[in-house]
Amino acid sequence: MASKYHNLSDYDINSVPNGKGMKVGIVVSEWNKEITGALLDGAVNTLLKHGVEEKDIRVKTVPGSFELIFGASQMVKTDVDAVIAIGCVIRGDTPHFDYICAGATQGLAHLNATQDVPVIYGLITTNDMQQALDRCGGALGNKGDECAVTALKMVEFKKNV
């Protein structure tokens, strides 16, 4: 669903499982830190709001969005119930954007499909800085909120399968 039709921070609070006892790993890219820092804040605050204890949220940084794949692959080997991968790639003048977005997306999708821990896709890919700002707490809400809710729902899903 296109974000322009949906605020990323809007969700039915009653549909979100209680996170008490859940452990969530977050791997966040240092690149575009203004954006990824705001996404991280959104994810952490939403996890806390839904009962995950601060001590049960493990945050690790990686240099860029492509490195989210390795970071998440290592994080799933720890004692977490879900991993959220947070990054931001903003289109530039070269095809680098396409390669990073495709590689990171494929790598994270592969982890999500092959690991026993849900890997939540929190990579925003935008055409410009304003679109990124709109998705990290601006006009379209915060993708970090959405990722945290998704992590809680996927942990609950796994418990019930």
Image (tube, helix red, strand yellow):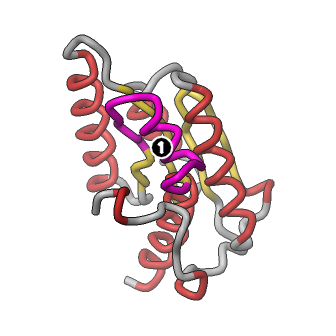
The residue under label 1 is which amino acid type? Ala
Q: Within 10 angstroms of label 1, few (less than 14), some, or many (20 or more) residues?
A: many
Is 108 above or below relative to 79?
above
Give whichever of 115, 17 is nearer the camera: 17
Is 145 above or below relative to 38?
below
Residue farthest toward the top in the current orientation of the protein? 94
Residue at the spot 46% in from the left edge and 22% down from the top edge: 64
Image side of residue 41 versus residue 142, left or right: right
Q: Secondary structure at mark 1?
A: strand
Say if residue 74 shows up in the picture. Answer: no
- Numbered disc total: 1
Residue 113 horizontal/vertical position (percent): 27, 56
* Quadrant that contains the N terminus: bottom left
Residue 146 horizontal/vertical position (percent): 50, 61
Give whichever of 1, 156 is nearer the camera: 1
Say if residue 24 shows up in the picture. Answer: yes
Residue at the spot 53% in from the left edge and 29% down from the top edge: 29
Q: Give the residue pinned by disc 1.
A: 85
Residue 62 horizontal/vertical position (percent): 54, 25
- Span shown in magenta: 123-141
Residue 135 horizontal/vertical position (percent): 49, 47
* Quadrant that contains the C terminus: bottom left
Residue at the spot 26% in from the left edge and 46% down from the top edge: 110
Does the magenta portion include 124? Answer: yes
Image side of residue 110 versus residue 9, left or right: left
